[in-house]
Structures are given as structure tokens and as C-alpha cells.
């Protein structure tokens, strides 16, 4: 009876650490995929880190510390189509000023996204000019009243 109990216990202990390791590997892979998606989204949506920081962090920019609700709202408004939960889980470790709980520092969220650190200018050659073939339709649209209706 004692040896049977030890065998079962040994089997259970050997099985659970393996499952825990697999679960940790899945979380790591999932987080890596989330971070890569965030990086890709940021590079497609924003031209520079200051632009992204201003949009997501508001007036405080890169120094803003966002609660979960603030982060979720900022990402949603920017067009990010995924849940903010995994990102908050990864980056939400900074105490919120004057409140209980933790938040995400915008600078940490944007780190390693691959965005240029400086605001780009038209003379830098990195900003794409407006396509010439669309310029005439753009000018015609500007002459139309709002909504394109004639008065």
C-alpha cells in the first residue's frame, strides 16, 4: 500500500511540473506574439515615438502612467484591435501617482517598437509625399461643402 501511494505521488509530481512548464512556455510564446503584434501596429500607425507617446499618453506623453482603463481606451482610439490585458499584464508594474494600483508607463510600452525616436520632418526624406495622382481629387474635395453635397 505504501509503495503504491509513492508511485502515484511520483507520477503526479512528474506530470504537473511538466504541465506547468508547458503552460509557462505557451504564455511566453503568446506574450512574444502580442509584443510583436504591438510593434507591428505601432510602426504602421505612427511615424515616430513622440507622435505615439503624445497620442497614447496625452499631455504627459512618454512619462504618462496609465491605468488599465486608460491604456485600453488609448489603444482602442488608436485603432489597436486587440485586448489591452496582456500588455497591461506585461508592462503594468509602476505605481499609479496618488492612487492605489499599478499602471503602464507609456515609454516602457513604446520601447523597442522600432519607431524613430525623433519627430520626422518633410525634409528628412523619410516622410512619404502625398501622391500626385490624388492631389487633384483632393483639391476638388476641398471645394465641396462638408459631406460632398451641393448647396
Image (cartoon, rainbow, N blue to C red):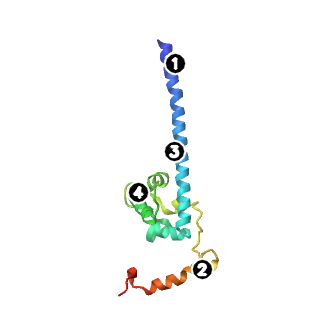
Question: Percent position (x, y) of residue 146?
Answer: 39, 82
Q: Position of residue 55 (x, y in %)?
A: 47, 69
Crowding at label 3, few (<14), some or many (≥20) Cα neighbours within 10 Å?
few
Q: Which circle's residue, 1 or 4, is located before the other in the chain? A: 1
Q: CA distance from mark 1 to mark 4?
A: 46 Å
Give the structural element (helix, strand or loop) at label 3: helix
* Comparing labels 1 and 2, the label whose residue is closer to the camera: 2
Instruction: Name the residue beneath numbered marker 4.
Output: 68
Left or right, 43 with reference to 54: right
Viewer-nearest residue: 38 or 66: 38
Q: Secondary structure at mark 4?
A: helix
Q: Which residue is labeled 2 in the image?
A: 122
Label 2 and label 3: CA atoms lie apart by 42 Å
Query: Would you say 42 lies left or right of 100 here?
Result: right
Label 2: how many residues lie within 10 Å, few (<14), some (14-19) or many (20+)? few
Q: Earlier in the sequence, mark 4 or mark 3?
A: 3
Residue at screen point 44% across, 53% down: 85
Q: Is residue 23 above or below residue 147?
A: above
Quadrant of the frame with the C terminus: bottom left
In the rendered image, the residue lying farthest to the right is 125
Q: Are marks 1 and 2 in contact (CB under 8 Å)?
A: no
Q: Which residue is mark 3?
A: 27
Q: How far is disc 1 from disc 2 in space, using C-alphas?
A: 72 Å
Secondary structure, mark 1, is: helix
Residue 7's tag is 1
Discs 1, 4 touching: Cβ within 8 Å:
no
Q: Residue furthest front?
A: 150
Position of residue 137 in the picture relative to residue 76 (left or right): right
Q: Earlier in the sequence, mark 4 or mark 2?
A: 4
Residue 53 spot, x, y in % from top left: 50, 67
Amino acid at each position: 500500500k505504501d509503495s503504491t501511494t509513492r508511485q502515484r505521488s511520483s507520477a503526479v509530481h512528474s506530470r504537473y511540473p511538466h504541465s506547468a512548464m508547458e503552460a509557462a512556455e505557451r504564455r511566453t510564446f503568446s506574450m512574444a506574439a502580442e509584443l510583436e503584434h504591438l510593434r507591428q501596429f505601432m510602426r504602421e500607425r505612427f511615424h515616430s515615438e513622440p507622435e505615439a507617446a503624445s497620442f497614447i499618453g496625452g499631455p504627459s506623453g512618454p512619462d504618462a502612467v496609465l491605468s488599465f482603463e486608460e491604456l485600453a481606451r488609448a489603444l482602442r482610439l488608436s485603432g489597436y484591435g486587440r485586448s489591452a490585458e496582456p500588455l497591461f499584464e506585461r508592462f503594468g508594474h509602476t505605481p499609479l501617482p496618488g492612487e492605489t494600483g499599478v499602471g503602464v508607463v507609456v515609454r516602457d510600452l513604446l520601447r523597442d517598437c522600432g519607431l524613430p525616436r525623433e519627430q520626422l520632418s518633410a525634409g528628412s526624406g523619410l516622410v512619404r509625399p502625398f501622391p500626385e495622382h490624388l492631389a487633384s481629387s483632393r483639391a476638388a474635395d476641398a471645394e465641396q461643402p462638408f459631406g460632398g453635397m451641393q448647396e
